[in-house]
Amino acid sequence: MQKRRKLLLIPKEMFKIKKFTFSISVLVVVILVALVGPPLYPKLNLSLYAGTPDTPPSNEFPLGTDRNGRDILSHLLIGIRTSLYVGVIATIIALTIGILVGSFAGFKGGVIDEILMMITNIIYTLPAILLMILIASYLKERSPLFVSIVIGVTSWPWLARAVRAQIMSLKEREFVQMSKMSGLKGYEIIFKDLLPNMASYIFMSVALLLSISMLAEAGLSMIGAGIDPSTESSLGVMLQRAQQGEAIRLGRWWCFVPPGIVLVLITTSLLMLSTSIDEYFNPRLRGGK
């Protein structure tokens, strides 16, 4: 008889997977830079005119300045923190909604399943970026928290559908039937029996949602529907400023290469983390070992 699984810490064997070790190392470094970088950088300045406009990297400004004299390194350090903040909050929101909707739809079935899946499918069929643009443009709020909420409430349908499918499969297992016979309520079975058996998939979903959320923030900011560039800085805001300042045409690579590299590095590491988790928990991907 299959037993309940418990949520455990990261198994040591996972660190034998090179992709997992690399992705975790990159993410740890990025998080440390976001937390420790701004307090340690002596020239941290987010004002519009911190130095001479369009200055290439130098001893005074390690990553140069943009057309308004902004210190690129200052904005990069703050931008990493802001983008991670948006990604984490949006991921928590999307993960919570997706798991709750998918779990109760799959476990309850019947009318509840039909209603929840109808709502899910309606949102799923609409382009997520279009929903984000409409919501962000209509409400006119541009704070990082609001952008996080907008991204989170539009990014959960695919997760809800996947969770529902797995719940419908798991709820027919013997250990769930035993839990029903012992008198456990529906929500207790979901959170004590079913979700722990989906731990690996949930961990993969967290990495994917975080990557999707950070890319969505960058996309919204680049088209002017994201974080307010006059008060905040993020990786997406930095790319937007580079675009508006025609940095690519003018050859001012220092304006768009640093935020672009950091964004690609973070999202690539998150995708590698997701695939490495799948590789560990899927025997077929491990060659049956």
Image (tube, grey):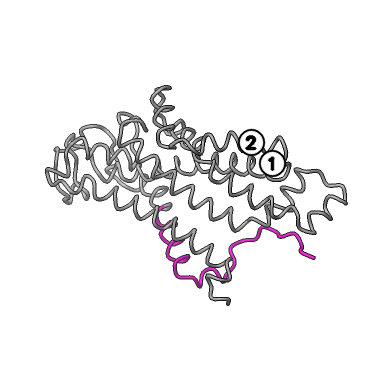
Query: In x, y percent, where is residue 10?
Result: 58, 63
Q: Which residue is mark 2?
A: 116
Q: Is residue 84 magenta?
A: no
Task: Give amino acid for label 2.
Answer: Leu
Report the side of 107 relative to 124 (left or right): right
Task: Give amino acid for label 1.
Answer: Phe
**Who's the residue at 73% across and 41% down the image?**
108
**Who's the residue at 22% across and 38% down the image?**
243
Query: In x, y percent, where is residue 109?
Result: 72, 42
Query: In x, y percent, where is residue 114?
Result: 66, 36
Q: In what quadrant of the picture does the C terminus appear?
A: bottom right
Query: In x, y percent, where is residue 240?
Result: 27, 37
Q: What segment is highlighted magenta in the picture? A: 1-30
Q: Which residue is mark 1?
A: 104
Q: Is residue 27 magenta?
A: yes
Q: Main secondary structure of the magenta part?
A: helix
Q: Secondary structure at mark 1?
A: helix
Q: Looking at the image, do the residues carrying marks 1 and 2 touch, with CB atoms under 8 Å apart? A: yes
The residues bearing labels 1 and 2 have C-alpha atoms spaced at a distance of 9 Å
